[in-house]
Amino acid sequence: MSLAGVATAAFGATRGRHGDEAGPAHGPSPAGPIPTTPTVDRLEQARTRIKAYVERYGGHLAVAALDRQGSAAVTVGTRRFETASIVKVNILAALLLRQKPPGKALGSETRRLAEAMITSSDNPAAVALWQRIGGSRGLTAANRALDLRETRPNSHWGLTTTTAADQLRLLTALTSPTGPLTPQDRTFVLGLMSKVIPEQRWGVTAAREPGNRSVYVKNGWDTVDVDGGRWLVNSIGRIVEARHDWLIAVLSDHHVSQEEGVRVVEKAATYVLKEMRAATAGDGPSQG
């Protein structure tokens, strides 16, 4: 099932039960309605509120989040956005998938470029590694292995387009033991995402709980010529908590400034995780 389908399945299960009650009853009365799980009900309500929140932005905001330790998941918005620098995580994953044998450590110079590309969003480093993976063609091949279905590489890497759901698939590939990357590769990428320089540690990290330092992030920001020079601001990452392991992506554009875009992204990420935490607050211990 697709990540976007997780929410659909939960909605569908509940709607199906309600639909059985429509119209006059015939024959023996049933013993009673099949009760829905309280958590499913709360998640449905949370998704409805999140959907309404996102739709206020008229298609200029999309979010996707899931809890790796539970059943909470939501995706709102199917539009493709330009990636800007969040594609650098995708480029690094593609580079690691080319290593022979799998999991082989990068050479010192390549490792230096990878560190600069992720931790300080260095563009010359991204250009060098983009060329090493074979550009658009190499990224397309890697994305088949990573199960990215809605990302369209562009010869100008920052103009690659993607969806929130696909960024969640990328984050899943970076964290799943059954994904295409080796444990060493996953540790390397996440390690860099945990060391992003302070001035770039905004975005989805705003949704972390007070005192939590177990966060991983990569942001992207740029002006869009076809949108009159307005700003796009994107943020993807992971937030690990005592009872949750959140993967979250927030994509946005049409901002009058980068600062406004950052505010929108941070407010959206914070709202989404607040709703999802509340919806699962009564659950038992999460299963890993």
Image (tube, rainbow, N blue to C red):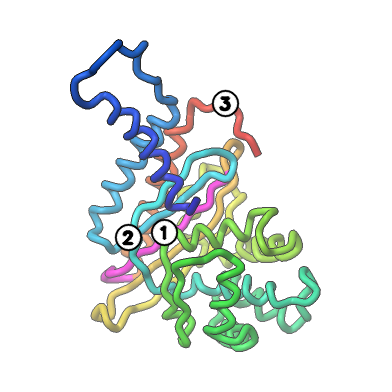
Task: Tell me the number on the disc at residue 61.
Answer: 2
- Closer to the camera in the image, 190 or 81: 81
* First reached walking from the N terminus: tag 1 or tag 3: 1
Q: Position of residue 135 (x, y in %)?
A: 56, 86
Q: Position of residue 15 (x, y in %)?
A: 32, 34
Q: What separation in Å lies between label 1 and label 2 (alpha carbons)? A: 7 Å
Amino acid carrying label 1: it is Val
- Give the residue displayed 47% in from the left and 62% down from the top: 166
Amino acid carrying label 2: it is Leu
Task: Tell me the number on the disc at residue 284.
Answer: 3
- Closer to the camera in the image, 24 or 101: 24
Label 3's element?
loop
Instruction: Give the residue at mark 1.
Output: 250
Crowding at label 1, few (<14), some or many (≥20) Cα neighbours within 10 Å? many
In this picture, residue 243 sits left or right of residue 61: right
Amino acid carrying label 3: it is Gly
Q: Give the quarter of the image for residue 179.
A: bottom right
Write down the region rendered in magenta. 245-257
- Give the residue displayed 54% in from the left and 77% down from the top: 140
Are the residues flagged by discs 1 and 2 in contact, CB closer than 8 Å? yes
- Quarter that holds the C terminus: top right
